[in-house]
Image (cartoon, rainbow, N blue to C red):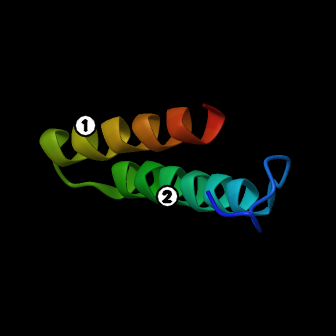
Amino acid sequence: MTEDDSVGSTGERDDDVTYLRGRAEWHRHRADVANDDSTRALHRKFATLYQARAEG
């Protein structure tokens, strides 16, 4: 952390959360259109992980 970084700044965190939620949604969509169970399960797992990171 540099002197210019603000501990209370949430701009970067907000961007990260937006990105993580977007990735979670993308993986949920890919799971919905997956042709096989293993691909579907993989995308659901990634969606869960990205959503947990966004909420964490």
Residue sitting nearer the eye, 24 or 11: 11
- Check disc 1 and give the amino acid type: Ala
Residue occupying the point 41% across, 53% down: 27
Assign a secondary structure to mark 1. helix
25 sits to left or right of 46: right
For marks 2 and 1, give the one nearer the viewer. Answer: 2
In the rendering, at what x and y percent does residue 22 appear? 58, 60
Measure the alpha-carbon separation of dots 2 and 1.
Answer: 16 Å
- First along the sequence among labels 2 and 1: 2
* Left or right relative to 5: residue 17: left
Quadrant for the N terminus, please: bottom right
Q: Residue at x 60, y 42 (%)?
A: 54
Compared with 37, 3 (above or below) is: below
- Name the residue at 40% across, 50% down: 32
Q: Which residue is tagged 1?
A: 41
User: Is 55 left, or right, of 35 in this rendering?
Assistant: right
Which image quarter holds the C terminus?
top right
| Residue ID for mark 2 | 23
Q: Locate residue 13, reporting x and y percent.
A: 70, 54
Find numbered disc 2 in the image and state the secondary structure of the residue it sits on.
helix
- How many other residues sit within 10 Å of disc 1, few (<14), some (14-19) or many (≥20)? few
